[in-house]
Every structure is written in structure tokens, then in C-alpha cells.
Amino acid sequence: MAFPRFPVTAAVLLSLVTALPQPAAAQASREGPTFAASGAWPGNALRRPDVAFDPANGVYLVVSAPMTHGRFVNSDGVPIGSDFYIPAGGTYNQTPRVAYSPNLGGFLVTWLDTRLDPRGQAASVWGRLVQFGTGGAPVFPTGDFLIGAAVPSVDPERGASVAYSTVSQRFLVVYHQYGGGAVPVKVVNPDGGSFT
């Protein structure tokens, strides 16, 4: 059976396309005030921030450096509580990164820290688990734990990237090290910082 042929012109095609429902235009705009997310090491500017969201509590954790600080911010962008220092140690540290785990109900914060170098120059990757507490106060289920001591050291200008898998229920941390070749990869369990 042969189908009849109909001449289709550009005008006919255009009229068919414009008759289809069009998607609404997406719009984005800034909301809320600008505020200082967290403090900084005296004499240094706040830099290299990162952020992750906790849907169970409806809060973000904003982290920044130097001297890794954090602050909780509600879903409307309003700060909750005051900023807080994340590492338990006081050696120079910077370039924090953060990821959220729904299984933990909290965050893994990673940063670069010089505590293993007696000269205070070569950095290693450290981490600590942080949860949202009453009034925006942090709860620390663990102390600081070493994630990776790169040889000879990590690049202090590049933070250790961190992500969480709801499938394996683990964090994956990757970082750059001097000396080239491989990119170190570490798996972190959200049970107090044990590694596999």
C-alpha cells in the first residue's frame, strides 16, 4: 500500500514546531545576604571554600581556609551559630574539602596539614567527621585521622577531592602528590575513619 505524498514546506514545519508546548524558561537568582562563612588564619585572606548539603537537617556545611574552619548555613542561606575550627590539632592547614553521607548523617571534611613534617612545610591529607548539632554547634564523632601521607608531600594548592557513594556507603578521597605518576586514592568508611 502506497502512502500519498504531501508537500511539506519550511513554513508548515515551523508552524508545527511552534504549536508544540514550549518549556518554561529557567531562571536563577541570588537570594539572601552575603556573610562571612568562616574565619581565617590571622594575616591571611579567607580562600579555597567548599560546601556540601545535609538534607536530613536542611543545612549546608561551608568549609574554608587557611586554618580549616566551618559554618552551618540553613537552606535559605542564613548562617546558623558561629564558625568553628575543624581540626583538633593546631598546625598549619589549608584547602579543605567536604562531602555528606546520609548513612553517617554527617560530613567528612578533608584538609592538607603539616603536622607530620618537623619543618612545618610538607603537607599530608587529614580528615574528621562532622555532624550538625543543636544551634549549629558541630558534633565531632571522631578526632583527626590521617588519610594519606604522600611522598614527598601533597600539592598544598590542590585540595583532596572527596565524594560519598550511597551504594558502597564509603567516601572516596583522591589527591595530588609531588613526584608525579599516580594519583593516590583512599577509601574511608564512615565508622570513625577506618580505611580499606
Image (cartoon, grey):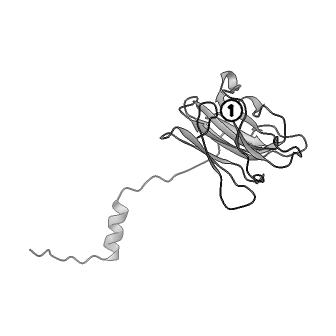
Based on the displayed image, in which of its 4 quarters is residue 72 positioned? Answer: top right
Q: Is residue 6 above or below residue 23?
A: below
Q: Is residue 66 visible?
A: no
Query: For the point 46% across and 52% down, which residue is it?
Result: 24
- For badge 1, the amino acid type reads Phe
Would residue 4 appear left or right of 166 to someone viewing this image?
Answer: left
Query: For the point 18% across and 77% down, which residue is it?
Result: 5
Give coordinates of residue 173: x percent, y percent: 63, 46
Q: Is residue 141 above or below residue 117?
A: above
Farthest residue to the top: give it.
134
Counting the numbered discs, the total is: 1
Give coordinates of residue 15: x percent, y percent: 34, 67
Query: For the point 68% across and 29% down, which residue is it?
Result: 142
Would residue 38 appear left or right of 42 to someone viewing this image?
Answer: left
Mark 1 surroundings within 10 Å by alpha-carbon count, few (fewer than 14), some (14 through 19), many (20 or more): many
Based on the displayed image, in which of its 4 quarters is residue 192 positioned? Answer: top right
Query: For the point 68% across and 38% down, which residue is it?
Result: 109
In this view, the residue in front, 181 or 4, is: 181
Give coordinates of residue 65: x percent, y percent: 78, 43
In this view, the residue in front, 73 or 185, is: 185
Give coordinates of residue 186: x percent, y percent: 62, 46
Look at the image and tell me in which quarter the C terminus lies. top right
Based on the displayed image, in which of its 4 quarters is residue 40 positioned? Answer: top right
Would residue 20 appear left or right of 119 to someone viewing this image?
Answer: left
Residue picked out by circle 1: 72
Q: Is residue 182 above or below residue 91?
A: below
Q: Is residue 94 visible?
A: yes
Would residue 167 appear left or right of 70 to someone viewing this image?
Answer: left
In this view, the residue in front, 72 or 140, is: 140
Which secondary structure, mark 1?
strand
